[in-house]
Amino acid sequence: MNRKWLGAIVLLTLMNGSATSTQGPALDRLMRKKLDTSQKSLEAVVTSRWASLEARSRELEALTNDPAWMVLKAPEYERHSSAFRSAARALHDAAAKRDLEATPQAYVTLTLSCVQCHRYLARNRMAR
């Protein structure tokens, strides 16, 4: 189980670094905040620190309100953003219920939403 979590974090870190390097300092800071908050969320998932996880999941959702978040004005990007917000809410709900089964699944879903969006952005840049 620990290898899966470590793999998810490494993948998220790699995807985060590659997707933000050309987007400007505001987005770089925002993505770094997202990564840091995601890592703290993982720590809270693994240690069952429910209050911390609830707060971190709310922070993640709030990041999507930052103007720097909207790097593209495209329906596909909005779909990815919506999936991320939904995953952050699901993580919050699982933490609020203290659900030991749903919480790690919600975290993985959140992480996968990041990876899928970063892959989309990388393909978008290559197409240009």
Image (cartoon, grey):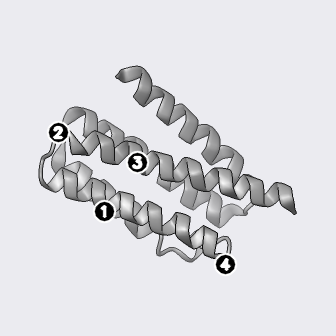
Query: Of callouts 4 and 3, which one flags the residue occurring earlier in the amino acid sequence?
Result: 4
Q: Which residue is mark 4?
A: 73
Relative vertical location of residue 16 with respect to residue 89 in this rendering, above or below: above
Mark 1 or 3: the one toward you: 3
> Quick one: SS at disc 2?
loop
Please rate how many residues cluster around mark 3, counting C-alpha atoms within 10 Å: few if below 14, some from 14 to 19, many from 20. Answer: some
Percent x, y for residue 17? 66, 45
| Residue at the image point whose x is 76% and y is 60% from the top | 124
The Cα atoms of the two marked residues, 1 and 3, are separated by 11 Å
Instruction: Name the residue at the left extreme.
Output: 97
Question: In this rendering, would 25 be left or right of 109?
Answer: right
Relative vertical location of residue 54 with respect to residue 102 in this rendering, above or below: below
Q: Nearer the viewer, residue 119 or 50?
A: 119
Q: Which residue is mark 2?
A: 100
Q: Nearer the viewer, residue 73 or 76?
A: 76
Query: Of callouts 1 and 3, which one flags the residue occurring earlier in the amino acid sequence?
Result: 1
Query: Of callouts 4 and 1, which one flags the residue occurring earlier in the amino acid sequence?
Result: 4
Q: Which residue is mark 3?
A: 109
The kind of residue tagged 4 is Lys
Q: Which residue is mark 1?
A: 89
